Amino acid sequence: MLTHIGTQPIETERLLLRPFQMEDAPAAWANWAGDEASQRLLCEPVYATLEETQELLRHYIGQYDCADRTRYRWAIIEKASGECIGQVAYFLVHERYHFGELEYCVGRAYRRRGYCTEAVRAVMAYGFGQVHFHKIQVSHMEGNEASRGVILKCGFRYDATLRDCFYIDGAYCGRAYYSMLEGEWKNA
């Protein structure tokens, strides 16, 4: 059985993971939500204006107030600058089967510094240690080698690729899935 506690702040060496605040909108829009290259890797829409990004954050913030506390989405704040550089979430929580599925991103200016790996590891520890997931799964679009690298550094095992899952720029591409079981995390 899962123990839902909602999105609580998590601190790592270089990051603060916390619930989104409306004040994060300008940095979120500048760093990732308004960036076509970043959003394409997530197969998410580009938020063309600050106002659209504010509406996205209103949606995220509104989910924190759900009575069952089953929503888990963090702003990734770089401690050194105080800036919102990305986001990490359990965007899918399956109560019956005791698993959560992760998504994450950081803005282009903050990539290749280990921030995603640091954030994902912290959220994995939260998921297994606090929420008590049996399994955490994650995926990436085929060809996104940077995301694949984060997934492998975090210790996930490859499960399968769903063929032709996305249609982008006139071509199909697959979605590669990975997972980790609670026992594997405890033994790592």
Image (cartoon, rainbow, N blue to C red):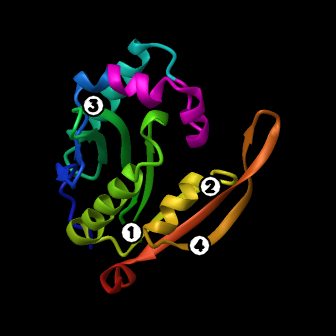
Q: Distance between the residues labelled 2 and 4?
A: 14 Å
Mark 2 and mark 4 lie on one chain; the one further toward the N terminus is: 2
Foreground tag (4 vs 1) = 4
Q: Do the residues labelled 2 and 4 touch (CB within 8 Å)?
A: no
Foreground tag (3 vs 4) = 3
Q: Give the range drawn in magenta.
A: 26-46
Mark 2 and mark 3 lie on one chain; the one further toward the N terminus is: 3
Q: Distance between the residues labelled 2 and 3?
A: 26 Å
Q: Do the residues labelled 3 and 1 touch (CB within 8 Å)?
A: no
Amino acid carrying label 4: it is Tyr
Foreground tag (3 vs 1) = 3
Tell which of 3 and 125 is nearer to you: 125
Q: Do the residues labelled 3 and 4 touch (CB within 8 Å)?
A: no
Which residue was labeled with disc 4? Answer: 158
Few, some or many C-alpha atoms within 10 Å of disc 4 (few <14, some 14-19, many ≥20)? some
Amino acid carrying label 2: it is Glu
